[in-house]
């Protein structure tokens, strides 16, 4: 059971928007930055967002991140079939002294 | 372009030691502000950080695995390695090596991943 809580699944039609939440505590999200990863089957996780809201080069602006208090959010707009994947939030937990990942959210494009 | 590649046995017997190596190409493992780490994903479960190492040899481990995991670095070969002792079926997972950006703490480059199965 991860200390970062994500919804197991979200879905929307092509072109629509999905929002993925990541709920933590003061020992993790409340004190440090959050990253988000896209994980397609058979491939390694891909960095989508770092420092809560920054995108690495090559990541389209359809992907955006934010953080407020002890929660973080990933928003995907203009949903595409290629966005079907598992999405994970990640940060440092000072109580556990460990890098921690959320349980993952499966995005389905209807 | 930085590339990481895991190698090692894909099958390990229970109670034995799992050993994996990550070869880094396209960049030096000795760069400052970067750490190198191992992350695994058991079938159907979430990603789990195992531990990280700096090129100087300083190591950091996830507390539940600290007693069984060892990470080492060979800067001359641009490689770092993982061993996990006394493995059980619970250690069956896809093992990834990855680079951690030290300032903001995000994993920016990953190996393809390697499935390691613990079975007799």
Image (cartoon, grey):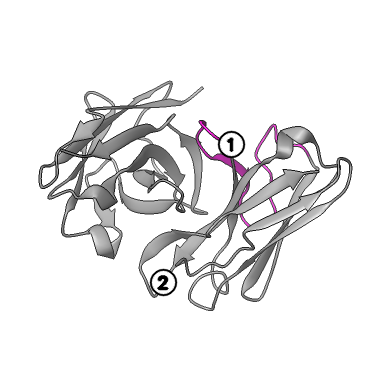
**Stretch in magenta:** A41-60
Q: Mark 1 lies on which chain?
A: A
Q: Which residue is under mark 1?
A: A40
Check residue A55 for magenta coloring.
Answer: yes
In which quadrant will I find the C terminus of chain B? top left
Q: Which of the two labelled residues, at mark 1 and mark 2, occupies the earlier sequence position?
A: 1
B67 vs A3: above or below: above
Dot 2: what SS?
loop
CB within 8 Å, label 1 to label 2: no
Residue B44 showing in the rendered view: yes
Q: Which residue is under mark 2?
A: A94
Q: Position of residue B64 (x, y in %)?
A: 26, 64
Q: Which residue is at 86% across, 40% downward? A: A14
Dot 1: what SS?
loop
Q: Position of residue B36 (x, y in %)?
A: 35, 42
The one nearer the camera, B57 or A107, is: A107
Q: Judge left or right: residue B13 versus residue A110.
A: left
- Give the main secondary structure, helix, strand or loop, of the magenta stretch: loop
């Amino acid at each position: 059971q991860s200390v970062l809580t994500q919804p197991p699944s979200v879905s929307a039609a092509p072109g629509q928007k999905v929002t993925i939440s990541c709920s933590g505590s003061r020992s993790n999200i409340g004190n440090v930055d959050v990253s988000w990863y896209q994980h397609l089957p058979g491939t390694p996780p891909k960095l989508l967002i770092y420092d809560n809201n920054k995108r690495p080069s090559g990541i389209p602006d359809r992907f955006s991140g934010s953080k407020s208090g002890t929660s973080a959010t990933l928003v995907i707009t203009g949903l595409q079939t290629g966005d079907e994947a598992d999405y994970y939030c990640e940060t440092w937990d000072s109580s556990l002294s460990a890098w921690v990942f959320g349980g993952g959210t499966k995005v389905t494009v209807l | 372009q930085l590339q990481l590649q895991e190698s090692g046995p894909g099958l390990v017997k229970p109670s034995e030691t799992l050993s994996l190596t990550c070869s880094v190409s396209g960049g030096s493992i000795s760069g400052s502000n970067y750490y190198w780490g191992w992350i695994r994903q058991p079938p159907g479960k979430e990603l789990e950080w195992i531990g990280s190492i700096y090129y100087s040899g300083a190591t950091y481990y996830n507390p539940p695995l600290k007693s069984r995991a060892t990470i080492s670095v060979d800067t001359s070969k641009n490689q770092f390695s993982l061993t996990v002792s006394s493995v059980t079926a619970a250690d069956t997972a896809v093992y990834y090596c990855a680079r951690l950006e030290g300032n903001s703490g995000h994993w920016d480059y990953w190996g393809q991943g390697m499935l390691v199965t613990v079975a007799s």
